[in-house]
Amino acid sequence: MARYEIIGGTQLFGSVTISGAKNAAVAILPAALLVDGVCRIENVPDISDVRILLSILEGMGVSVQRPETGVVILDSSHLSCTQPKEELVKKLRASYYLMGALLGRFHQAHVALPGGCNFAVRPIDQHIKGFRALGAKVVETDEYVKLRPGENGLKGNRISLDMASVGATVNIMIAATLLPGQTIIENAAKEPHIVDLANFLNTMGARISGAGTDTIKIHGVEQLKGGTYVIIPDQIEAGTYMAATAATGGDVLIKNVIPKHMECITSKLEEMGAEIINYDDAIRVRVKERLNHTTVKTHPYPGFPTDMQAQICVCMSLASGVSRLTESVYETRFFGYCTELESMGADIQINGKTAIVTGTDRLYGATVSAKDLRAGAALIIAGLAATGTTWVKNANYVERGYEQLIEKLSGLGAQIRRIED
């Protein structure tokens, strides 16, 4: 395990370039299993989740090349394995996308239940509902999910999700791409990486429409062929640097972003007093005075993302007045970081799904522990803004989703280093 040492109290200044979207990459890489040919995927972030996923694909017989930074070349034409290695699958949440990919290509799969950040109970019942609607026979245990064709075979169908689940939307979309007939996903998730996945599959020859709306239609095709695709910038990484700039009272140009994707975050930081300037592919965040209190409630896209909940809470902790932060997606997410922030001087009262955050003049350095990816990012932001030295343990969680974190923050003037224990 490793930890970060942060000497706080320094404002962030300069510019930072955002990497490819983690949530898009971990969906697109499994989807490449459907392609009978070579895929060149660009703007792939070099993060631990991606490295684990590529190891899984290599173990299944996929040819994986990384000829240059940010580029992955995959050739799945000789793939024959339908049971990826259990020990690797259990290391990340997104490994469940292998279920849809293998079901779509081979009409069968045997995949261990996924791992990843344990900040809430995240069942895969909507995934299973989708697979069964497509005609799969599902055997589900505490250890794995096994998929086979049912009595009537696999084919497209109409599926209405009980909730707008990102994971289920992705898995059903991947699985249905090569199945005969039309699949319609109702109450589909609308996140930018859903659109990115659809664009990737369409580039390879799929027929998918409606991504980004609550109804996605997939017309099954017989084959996908290879091609080149560039992954979108990471909305949450960009939002994290925006929050870090706001919390430290800095002035940062955040490059390689899609400002439209950032509107839900931008609007709240503007409410808090940050000056936001949008460019074609960049956002400048500038804060000259203490932040104001605000009210935030997380929602599926285009609402305020749950993956930014912890980061905005740090900004609230340093703002004037009393802020309210309500979590409507994963209500237990507060417990991953609020106690740690309180040890740094934050005043947070949790009442069910809502945190009441009373702003304080300053936070103080302390030894804290990251419980998950986004909680770890929030604690780093708190350490940057705090007086004194902060040690954030469990750096491996943060490295699941942030590429070159130390280099990027150091380039903005932060005093941060990684210590291997």
Image (cartoon, rainbow, N blue to C red):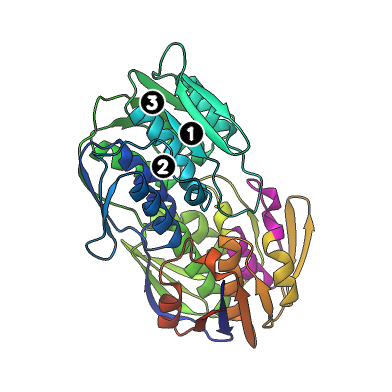
Figure quadrant of residue 223: top left
Instruction: Please determine whether, in this image, residue 70 is positioned above or below residue 222.
Output: below
Does 230 sit left or right of 12 as displayed?
left
- Magenta-colored span: 309-335
Q: Is residue 321 visible?
A: no
Does 292 sit left or right of 353 as displayed?
left
- SS for dot 3: loop
Q: What residue sits right under mark 3 in the picture?
A: 107
Distance between mark 2 and mark 1 Cα atoms: 9 Å
Figure quadrant of residue 221: top left
> Is the residue marked by circle 3 packed among few (<14), some (14-19), or many (20+) residues within 10 Å?
many
Q: What residue sits right under mark 2 in the picture?
A: 194
**Contact between labelled residues 1 and 2, with CB atoms less than 8 Å apart:** yes
Residue 385: give x, y in percent of width and height: 60, 80
Identity, as a three-letter code, of the amino acid under mark 3? His
Q: What residue sits right under mark 1 in the picture?
A: 188
Q: Residue at x 48, y 27 (%)?
A: 147
Q: Residue at x 36, y 53 (%)?
A: 54
Identity, as a three-letter code, of the amino acid under mark 1? Ala
